[in-house]
Image: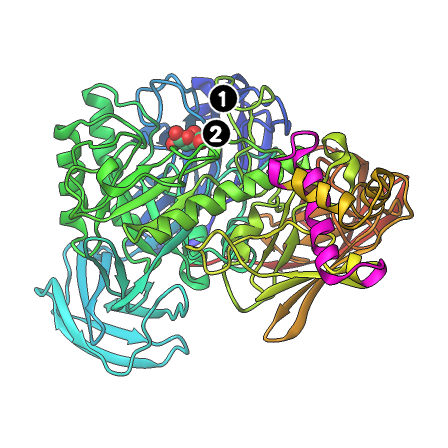
Amino acid sequence: MNKINNNWEYIDPWSDAFIIDGSADKVVRLPHTVQELPLHYANSESYQKVVGYRKKLTFDSSLKDRRYFIRFDGSAHKTTVYFNGKELYVHSCGYTAFIVELTDNILFDQENVLTVKVDSRESLNTPPFGFVIDYLTYGGIYRDVWLYDKPAYFIKDVFVTTNTLDTVSVSIQTDGLVPFDSYQVKILDSKGEIIAQQAVSINTRQIQIPVKNIHAWSAKSPTLYRCIVELGDDTFVTSFGFRTIRFDQNNLYINGQKVFLRGLNRHQCYPYIGYAAVDSLQEEDARILKEELHVNAVRTSHYPQSQSFIDACDRYGLYVFTEIPGWQHIGDETWKQQAIQNTKDMVLQYRNHPSIILWGVRINESLDDDELYAKTNEVARNLDPTRPTAGVRYLTKSHLLEDIYTFNDFSHHGDNKGALSKTEVMVDTHHPLIISEANGHMFPTKSFDTQARRQEHALRHARVFSDAMADHQHTGVFQWCMFDYATHKDFGSGDRICYHGVMDSFRNPKLAASVYASQQDEEPILEISTSMDIGDYNAGNLPDFYAFTNADEVRLYKNDQFVSEFSRSEYSGLKHGPIRIDDTIGKLLLENENFTSKQADDIRKCLLASKKYGNNLPLRYRLLYAKMMFQYKMKYSDGVALYGKYVSGWGSDSITWRFDAIKNGEVVKSIIKRPSAKLHLSYQVSRTTLIEGDCYDMSAIRIQVKDEYHNLASYAQLPLNLITTGPIEIVGPNTVVTEGGMTGTYIKTTGEEGEAILTISTSDCSAITIHFTITKGNHTL
Ligand code: GAL
């Protein structure tokens, strides 16, 4: 199977003359977007159009007896395929793959014309359209296109299941008249060694192969195997994992081990290019989820996402909840038939992925439609009896035709419990309950919002998680969402961005990302929710703040003097809940002033209370102040002076605050907060070796402005100039501005191999240069 992503003639708008020989506007490469968009204020009107793609193909008559196919992995949203002028196929889903057989229409040893009409108008009568949608739906042939040939007979599909960990069950489907009486089925381990092999009669559609000593697949240990089926000249290869799924009333068991799903929702969009991202960028999102956010699960809201993303979930180890396309609306009969077809295509195309553990067979947040959902459930269960069905609703007590109640729980609004109880949500509580979304629009938070808001954003994510975990009634939580995304005018912050992400649009982490990142024990995490600059808070009062960490405790030092240690988290459901830091005086009064321990403690309490309550001091503190005056003989001015020295610090010398994260008695991470105006740029690049060949390649560069203590300069809004040399180009504008101290860019290869450099510069900091090596290579399947 070869990728045919290069050299597509392109026309916008479509014209029927283009089917055979009308002239083209330009030549493009896939993945392709019909319209590049700005980061902010992207207009959904601009990508809604009908365009054409055309490619010339030749076939050698010496291979006349083969059968030829084209596979489109994703084309948004209605795709009509013409071959040598004849309409061969129409596909009405922008999120599933489809295959078109060319065989009977090929002209051998001469030029054949493959023309593709792509309609990306949101007026189409197909999911997800028909109402409003809270995300952009973009347009174009935005995933790979493949050309391949087969013998007259071939293996059409192989479905591998592992209901027990000592048997592989393989179902085989063929096409055409098979001139053999058996297939060979081989099972290979991750090193490529054959661990089981069987010759099977051609009439056997399903075989059971016993295996021994296998390594099960789980998010913690994602071991992959391969199944190869050989039939004469044809071979079918699929990877799979040994993995069992079982739910009881409240729990999920993977291979018999209880697992709580700790996940985020992911859209498949990127700034500027929308959906048109190459495989390596898709893989990068899976890596970020696993290695940076440390979640164990992802929901592919609200459609099946690219195979490369799901492959990467298989490899990195993420539990995936995938679902059919749609958003709140159910259309007419034709529309519903398409939703049923989408269910079928989704299950058939993704069912060998061990990462996928749930099929979403309802239109996200639609009302009950028992007739439709009885069918989608039936389709999924028939095509895959091994996975439970689910379907996302915002309705409590809706009809449950699925195995799992997946519920968007937006009940948390800051000062109530984080999640509704099972009895508040479901009629029949014998089924498991998963939160499929939470937070999101309830508390949109920009990377350039105030520290107080960013802290509350993070705490809300922690509350939902903690409460859902603590009540032992929830089987998992997928919160909304991984990163900020572009949306329609009806949603978002006016600039048509939903700032719902725990990361920004470029996948730079906001504070809320650390709630997720800290729920593991492999890598030390410490984030402090404030810069300690009192001027950022009302009346210069630094409120209680939080450490997001997986350490045992956090020790605070002021100008190298120990203040106090903090370890208790109110978020008891979480393994490593955020730790409140409510005392920046601690031992300092005792150490630095001439007080007894009791006096120092009373004064400390009074000063902290004054900070917290201002003039509305509760009676107990007023009494304590009276004690200070009469018993400790302190004057009002003494109190004011101590307040200035230990609390407000207006105009005081710069303070160095140090936070040490302590694990098993050792400092595993330190953060220093101190006023700093010396900024520098820092960056992370997704990859520096790029492969150019049958597809261009891309790299994502995340850019952050940091101070000299390596803290994010979250109010830095610096214009950055991006310049390239060598065979790469910038995707999007050549000047970007940091928002909340962060931004990003993408580069893509230009068809050549060689060395390339991206330079990022701004007048206030030293420039960054990133070197790339572009090598030639192709992708085959
Ligand atoms: C949900 C919806 C998501 C997103 C989210 C924002 O209702 O399913 O797509 O719009 O709200 O919080």
Residue behind mark 2: 441
* Circle 2: element type: helix
Q: CA distance from mark 2 to mark 1?
A: 9 Å
Q: Is residue 681 left or right of residue 580?
A: right
Q: Determine the quadrant in which ligand 1 lies.
A: top left
Q: Position of residue 158 (x, y in %)?
A: 23, 59
Contact, mark 2 vs mark 1 (Cβ under 8 Å): yes
Observer-nearest residue: 30 or 665? 665
Q: Which mark is residue 491?
A: 1
Instruction: State the extent of the magenta-drawn residues as a range.
Output: 591-620
Locate the C terminus by quadrant: bottom left
Which residue corresponds to the image point at 45% horizontal and 52% vertical from the top-left?
Answer: 308
Q: Position of residue 387 (x, y in %)?
A: 22, 54
Residue labelled 1 has its Cβ within 8 Å of some atom of ligand 1: yes
Mark 2 vs mark 1, foreground winner is: 2
Dot 1 surroundings within 10 Å: few (below 14), some, or many (20 or more)?
some
Q: Which mark is residue 309?
A: none
Which residue corresponds to the image point at 24% horizontal and 64% vertical from the top-left?
Answer: 244
Q: Can residue 452 be seen from the camera position used here?
A: yes
